[in-house]
């Protein structure tokens, strides 16, 4: 299944840029990558397309001290040290495991890193409870096996095996959703760097070419479901991606992603800065309330990550575009916020109701910019009333 | 040409280089292809603005270098500054060293008028402290005013002090604004000070601060921190930009990378020029306007003071050196430079009294105070030692006081009057800008050692690590340094590498890898103030705790220690225990009792103490500012608490209790007690009655057990209280705002301490009148009615039958039924002052459970339990005892059992009117009574014949608590006797007739 997914992704990558719904990072930023490679003079480990220094610039954007002739946009917002640590891990012989709450940008960082290092971020296996060892290593084309027996031709390599043979980066999403036996299949891949295929009489070992490494992501909320074995932990360097709580960075991320979304849909919606501030403030208040809550019932199910904020804004923008007057309204934002964050009825409604009346309303009363806040509070109340 | 002109010529190449930098900078800010024609004007103006700024920076450097009074620019706790000052002072003697430190703080260095003596016994780091318990000039929320100026051995200020101590011919003068001005120049708002205190740990998104579970460490508390050469940019955008471009996390890291390691190996002239340039840059870009305004004020102050000092002592400016923050050398105030005749008119100080002293400090405390990243000071210290070895230098040190009388001075640095390097050297700043800094001592060996050590340390802390990890850390450190444009991994890179390789999804034990790295790279260093430098109070504490030494306890030990005091084996330890209790009382962070208590009347047998003050001396030293001994401080504090304008009786009684516990001074106790009486008389409500009653009862019990008996003040307190509460009683009962619990407490005071009060001159009639007054009120709350009736019953003003009848009527009346629980609650409260109502309470509770409907009973149950809970210790046993008397003991007996209250005749129905006792008896009986009363001896004699003890007339002796019982109870035995032998009474009566 995962292998199929990769094929589809690869197909996507080769489609015309205008036709794909979402392009992988290496295609989207192909021009930047080419340019960076052309000016890169620093030593590159293995067969990397960019040196770690340039890869860092690709992910974090350029600054004047880099003395480049053009600006490279920032694509990942977070602690630069974290990206540096991730890069040097990939240059060493350990795998990289990105850990964080949902919506903190783990997969996005993994994609960017793979794109920067090997210009291919599509060797992905999605970890699920149903992922099998075959999907990490290889499987067989049954029809061909029946007709011609087991041979290299009838072998279907997994995305990881493809990455090995090409010396590129393989990605595993949600590693901790896989069962322990599947996870442990990675141990030999990470330490011996080859896969043995006993079914093939001769030439039954696939060796990884230099440059191969694995980026895995794991959700910290899933901790304890399928814990990694100690042996596997040893073979991964863990890089924890924290939830962004710095308002300035958060604003940058939300703007960056929303503009991307607008560009993808090719339409224009006014995004008043006051509304963005309201959104950020509300999330910050909700996070405070979440932190102060003593039981799970008093907490929202949502992780209140930056990705959720983008989700809210996306919802509101789409509503405004198709059912509004192409300008984002406070009421709509409130409605989208509540609609996105309320997942359990009545628990989440109760939590939201409390925060809305005790914190958000006060926030509106104290704010200098009363108009949008009042509409926001009103819109929220109206939406809350619709939950039965 | 003037000297200035020739200077600017010398800096010509430097200017050219800066100009080139302007070109490059202006060109690099925007992508070239993005530049369009319309933007060119804007860019030209931007370029000229940048050029002007750079030009001004070059001017700053030239001006500072040309200043006749030698400016020595420093950065806080910078080894490079320390090293260059050490070299400079060794090369050339100065007559005076001006130090950027608060004027007046030098007082903390001296003992007996001898400069620096206070530092001789200290282990660094320490902090000079200015302290004031309070002042009318500043908001009270700021008190106590506390300023610290930490000193580390590797700093320029330490070198200056050590040099001045070794060279008495060189004067050391603190020229920065005095601490008084720091507060004076702050906005006089309560929050203004709070904003400037380092109360929040550094928030860099990492849990880098040491965990709180570790033993209490040295801290400056809520002190305001001062440091020489504070260069940390306060303008956030600039700060952020600087760090981002340099790929570092903290300013200290940036400083290490770009300034410290470069200037450490440079010559003196280069050092000065680089520091002037950096200072100018940080001053121009890194400071907020409000900070610059404050800097200017300070610079005016410093220059005025310096010029004044030079003129006063007739010293040539060339014989003086000014050690100040690099940013101050780029000052734009008129007073700058000895050539400027302008002087500032220094405003007067406030009348605040400042006390000066030395307290121990620690690297962690300094880092926390000034928001340096943890571990940075330890790294600086390492660098300092490395640099000393590399330069083959001996630092100036403050030597310990020699044991013999003859004082040995510190090793004087050799060196004649070398010519000022600043005057002769060519501008070397050119090289600094042209070549990248070469860090001092980059050896792989050290990095390998770190990798191995951290792996071991991590293993000991529960991480599963092996040699493979050490190799990975080494490799990762190198790679990280490469990504960050560094020639060699810094300790910060190493820490990041170790975290990458070792930190997994959870921390196995208490410490994570970041903390372990900090520990490995140095941990904390804690200073200690020597005995001789301690204030008298602290010395006294050390002296008095001497007996503990040799019992596994060392006074000089800096660790947290456990002291075991066995008073049976060593009675002399009682004195030590007293000291420890006083310390504990004054400041809980000095020592904590693990076993043992100090309460009224307790006699300790053994005590066990956790003692921290040898580690954290600061609290004790601060106590030294308040008084000369612990007793003195406690007395001052108790008096302040009891005599404060807002003090209450409870506060005064609490002070009394503390005075008994910790001071054992009857004089002070009496003084505080007398004041408590004054406060009691002045109080107009019953709000504090429960606490007052509880405290005074405890004190009475305590004093009764003492051989000296009750002191006069307590007798006065009881009689005053009796009269006071009797006066307040009617109003309190009627006042809806006064809680029933307060009324109960008043009644408790009145009845429980009655015997004592009456014995010392109080009159019972006052209480009788007060209760009768209170009884006249209408519409009282049921709880208060119950309390009042209990009191009336005790005083013989009401019969129990009447109460019972009334409550039965309540139970029968559906309209009044819901109020029944309130009546019961009142009687429960009355249990507090008379156990006699226990039977009534049992009766009422039984009736309640038997007759109350569920809709009244069930909602009441929780509040009943809550009402009973506080009585659990003392009164519930009484209730249970009463229950066991009333109810049958066996199940079999239950069939034939009927409650005793049902058997009793029900006389009259409410409302009850109190009749005089005399109205119910016949005239004959009255005559008999009058006769018996007049001839008491006869009835006593009859009683004696019948074998009964003599019964004193209540009127003659309004006796102790038992006398307050109702007549039926106290005379029960006599009545029974007379009933059994009626003939006797008749005979006596007929005889009398």
Image: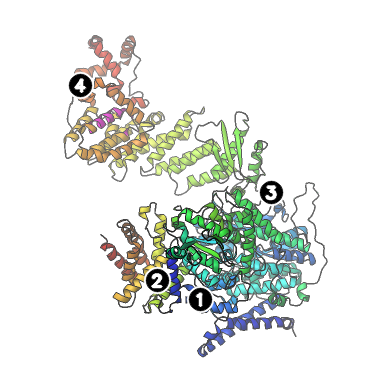
| Residue B31 position by quadrant | bottom right
- Chain of the residue under label 2: A
Residue under disc 1 on the same chain as residue under disc 4: no
- Chain of the residue under label 4: B
> For mark 3, what is the residue?
B530
> For mark 4, what is the residue?
B921
Marks 1/2: CA–CA distance: 22 Å
Residues rendered magenta in the picture: B830-848
Marks 2/4: CA–CA distance: 92 Å
Q: Residue furthest bottom?
A: B37
- Res A73 label: 1
**Which is in the foreground here, disc 1 or disc 2?**
1
Q: Is residue B345 above or below residue B829?
A: below
**Which is in the foreground here, disc 3 or disc 2?**
2
| Residue B196 position by quadrant | bottom right
- Chain of the residue under label 1: A
In which quadrant will I find the N terminus of chain A? bottom left
Q: Residue at x 51, y 55 (%)?
A: A184
Is residue B130 visible in this depiction of the protein? Answer: no
Do the numbered discs 2 and 4 sit on residues whose CB atoms are within 8 Å?
no
Q: Residues within 10 Å of mark 3 (few under 14, many from 20)?
A: some
Instruction: Give the mark nearer the N terminus: 1 vs 2.
Output: 1
Q: Residues within 10 Å of mark 1 (few under 14, many from 20)?
A: some
């Amino acid at each position: 299944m995962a292998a199929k997914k990769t094929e589809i992704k690869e197909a996507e990558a080769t489609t015309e840029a205008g036709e794909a719904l979402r392009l992988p990072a290496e295609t989207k930023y192909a021009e930047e990558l080419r340019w960076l490679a052309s000016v890169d003079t620093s030593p590159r480990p293995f067969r990397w397309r960019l040196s770690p220094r340039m890869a860092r610039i690709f992910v974090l954007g350029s600054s004047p001290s880099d003395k480049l002739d053009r600006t490279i946009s920032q694509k990942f917002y977070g602690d630069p040290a974290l990206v540096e640590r991730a890069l040097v891990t990939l240059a060493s012989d350990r795998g990289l495991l990105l850990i964080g709450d949902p919506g903190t940008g783990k997969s996005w960082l993994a994609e960017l890193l793979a794109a920067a290092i090997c210009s291919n971020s599509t060797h992905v296996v999605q970890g699920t409870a149903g992922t099998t060892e075959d999907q990490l290593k290889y499987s067989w084309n049954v029809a061909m096996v029946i007709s011609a027996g087991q041979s290299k031709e009838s072998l279907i390599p997994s995305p990881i095996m493809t990455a090995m043979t090409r010396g590129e980066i393989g990605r595993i999403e949600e590693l901790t959703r896989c069962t322990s036996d599947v996870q442990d299949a990675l141990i030999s891949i990470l330490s011996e760097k080859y896969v043995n295929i006993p079914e093939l009489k001769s030439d039954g070992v696939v060796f990884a070419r230099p440059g191969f490494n694995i980026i895995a992501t794991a959700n910290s909320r899933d901790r304890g479901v399928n814990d990694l074995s100690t042996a596997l932990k040893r073979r991964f360097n863990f890089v924890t991606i924290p939830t962004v709580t710095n308002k300035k960075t958060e604003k940058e991320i939300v703007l960056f992603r929303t503009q991307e979304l607008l560009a993808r849909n090719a339409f224009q919606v006014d995004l008043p800065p006051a509304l963005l501030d309201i959104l950020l403030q509300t999330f910050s208040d909700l996070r405070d309330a979440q932190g102060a809550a003593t039981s799970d019932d008093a907490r929202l199910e949502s992780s209140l990550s930056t990705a959720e904020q983008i989700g809210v804004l996306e919802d509101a923008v789409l509503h405004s575009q198709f059912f509004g007057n192409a300008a984002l309204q406070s009421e709509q934002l409130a409605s989208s916020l509540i609609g996105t964050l309320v997942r359990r009825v009545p628990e989440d409604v109760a939590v939201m109701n409390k925060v809305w009346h005790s914190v958000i309303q006060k926030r509106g009363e104290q704010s200098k910019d009363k108009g949008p806040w009042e509409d926001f509070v009103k819109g929220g109340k109206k939406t809350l009333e619709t939950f039965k | 040409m003037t000297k200035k002109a020739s200077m600017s010529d010398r800096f010509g190449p430097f200017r050219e280089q800066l100009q080139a930098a302007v070109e490059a900078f202006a060109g690099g800010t925007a992508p070239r292809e993005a530049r369009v024609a319309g933007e060119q004007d804007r860019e030209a103006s931007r370029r000229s603005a940048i050029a002007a700024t750079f030009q001004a920076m070059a001017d700053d450097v030239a001006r500072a270098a040309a200043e006749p009074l030698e400016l020595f620019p420093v950065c806080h706790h910078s080894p490079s500054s320390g090293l260059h000052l050490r070299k400079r002072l060794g090369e050339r003697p100065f007559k005076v060293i001006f130090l950027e430190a608060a004027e007046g703080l030098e007082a903390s260095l001296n003992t007996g008028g001898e400069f620096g003596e206070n530092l001789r016994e200290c282990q660094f780091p320490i902090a000079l402290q200015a302290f004031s318990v309070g002042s009318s000039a500043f908001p009270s929320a700021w008190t106590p005013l506390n300023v610290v100026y930490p000193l580390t051995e590797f700093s320029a200020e330490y070198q200056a002090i050590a040099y001045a101590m070794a060279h008495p011919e060189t004067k050391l003068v603190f020229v920065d604004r005095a601490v008084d001005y720091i507060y004076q120049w702050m906005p006089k708002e309560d929050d203004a000070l709070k904003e400037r205190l380092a109360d929040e740990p550094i928030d860099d998104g990492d849990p880098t601060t040491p965990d709180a579970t570790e033993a209490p460490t040295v801290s400056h508390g809520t002190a305001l921190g001062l440091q020489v050469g504070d260069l940390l940019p306060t303008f956030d955008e600039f700060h952020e930009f600087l760090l981002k471009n340099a790929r570092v996390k903290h300013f200290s890291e940036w400083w290490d990378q770009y300034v410290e390691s470069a200037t450490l190996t440079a010559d003196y002239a280069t050092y000065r020029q680089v520091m002037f340039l950096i200072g100018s840059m940080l001053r121009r870009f890194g400071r907020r306007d409000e900070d610059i305004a404050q800097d200017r004020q300070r610079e005016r102050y410093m220059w005025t003071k310096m010029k004044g000092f030079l003129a006063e002592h007739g010293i040539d400016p060339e014989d003086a050196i000014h050690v100040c923050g690099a940013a101050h050398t780029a000052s734009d105030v008129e007073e700058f430079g000895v050539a400027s005749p302008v002087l500032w008119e220094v405003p007067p100080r406030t009348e605040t009294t400042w006390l000066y002293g030395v307290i121990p400090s620690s690297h962690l405390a300094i880092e926390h105070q000034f928001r340096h990243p943890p571990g940075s000071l330890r790294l600086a210290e390492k660098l300092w030692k490395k640099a000393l070895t590399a330069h083959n230098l001996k630092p100036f040190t403050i030597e310990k006081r020699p044991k013999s009388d003859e004082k040995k001075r510190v090793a004087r640095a050799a060196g004649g009057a070398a010519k000022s390097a600043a005057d002769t050297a060519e501008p070397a700043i050119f090289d600094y800008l042209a070549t990248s800094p070469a860090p001092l001592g980059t050896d792989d060996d050290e990095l390998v050692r770190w990798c191995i050590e951290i792996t071991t340390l991590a293993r000991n802390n529960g991480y599963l690590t092996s040699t493979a990890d050490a190799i990975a850390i080494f490799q990762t450190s190198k790679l990280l340094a490469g990504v960050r444009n560094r020639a060699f991994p810094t300790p910060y890179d190493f820490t990041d590498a170790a975290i990458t390789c070792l930190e997994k999804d959870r921390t196995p034990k208490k410490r994570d890898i970041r903390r372990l790295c900090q520990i490995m790279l140095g941990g904390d260093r804690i200073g200690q103030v020597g005995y001789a430098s301690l204030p008298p109070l602290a010395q006294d504490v050390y002296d008095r705790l001497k007996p503990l030494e040799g019992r596994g306890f060392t006074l000089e030990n800096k660790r947290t220690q456990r002291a075991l005091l066995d008073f049976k084996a060593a009675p002399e330890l009682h004195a030590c225990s007293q000291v420890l209790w006083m310390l504990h009382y004054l400041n809980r962070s000095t020592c904590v009792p693990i076993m043992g208590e100090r309460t009224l009347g307790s006699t300790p047998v053994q005590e066990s103490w956790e003692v921290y003050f040898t580690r954290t001396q600061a609290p004790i030293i601060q106590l030294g500012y308040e008084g000369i001994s612990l007793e003195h401080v406690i007395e001052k504090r108790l008096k302040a608490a009891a005599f404060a304008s807002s003090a209450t009786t409870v506060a005064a009684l609490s002070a009394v209790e503390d005075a008994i516990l910790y001071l054992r001074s009857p004089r002070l106790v009496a003084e505080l007690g007398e004041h408590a009486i004054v406060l009691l008389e002045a109080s107009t409500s019953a709000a504090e009655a429960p606490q007052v009653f509880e405290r005074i009862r405890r004190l009475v019990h305590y004093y009764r057990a003492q051989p000296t008996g009750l002191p006069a003040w307590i007798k006065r307190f009881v009689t005053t209280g009796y009269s006071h509460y009797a006066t307040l009683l009617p109003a309190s009962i009627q006042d809806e705002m006064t809680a029933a619990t307060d009324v109960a407490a008043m009644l408790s005071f009145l009845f429980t301490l009655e015997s004592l009060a009456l014995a010392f001159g109080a009159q019972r009639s006052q209480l009788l009148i007060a209760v009768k007054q209170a009884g006249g009120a209408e519409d009282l709350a049921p709880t208060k009615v119950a309390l009042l009736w209990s009191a009336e019953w005790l005083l013989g003003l009401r019969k129990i039958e009447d109460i019972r009848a009334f409550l039965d009527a309540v139970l029968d009346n559906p309209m009044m039924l819901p109020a029944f629980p309130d009546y019961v609650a009142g009687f429960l409260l009355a249990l507090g002052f008379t156990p006699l109502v226990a039977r009534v309470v049992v009766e009422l509770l039984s009736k309640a459970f038997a007759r109350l409907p569920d809709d009244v009973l069930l909602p009441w149950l929780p509040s009943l339990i809550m009402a009973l809970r506080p009585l659990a210790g003392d009164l519930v046993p009484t209730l249970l005892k009463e229950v066991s008397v009333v109810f049958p003991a066996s199940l079999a007996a239950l069939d034939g059992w009927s409650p005793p209250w049902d058997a009793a005749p029900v006389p009259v129905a409410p409302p009850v009117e109190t009749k005089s006792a005399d109205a119910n008896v016949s005239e004959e009986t009255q005559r008999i009574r009058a006769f018996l009363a007049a001839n008491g001896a006869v009835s006593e004699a009859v009683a004696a014949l019948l074998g009964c003890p003599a019964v004193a007339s209540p009127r003659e002796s309004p006796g102790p608590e038992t006398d307050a019982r109702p007549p039926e109870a106290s005379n029960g035995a006599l009545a029974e006797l007379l009933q059994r032998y009626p003939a006797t009474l008749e005979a006596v009566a007929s005889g009398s007739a």
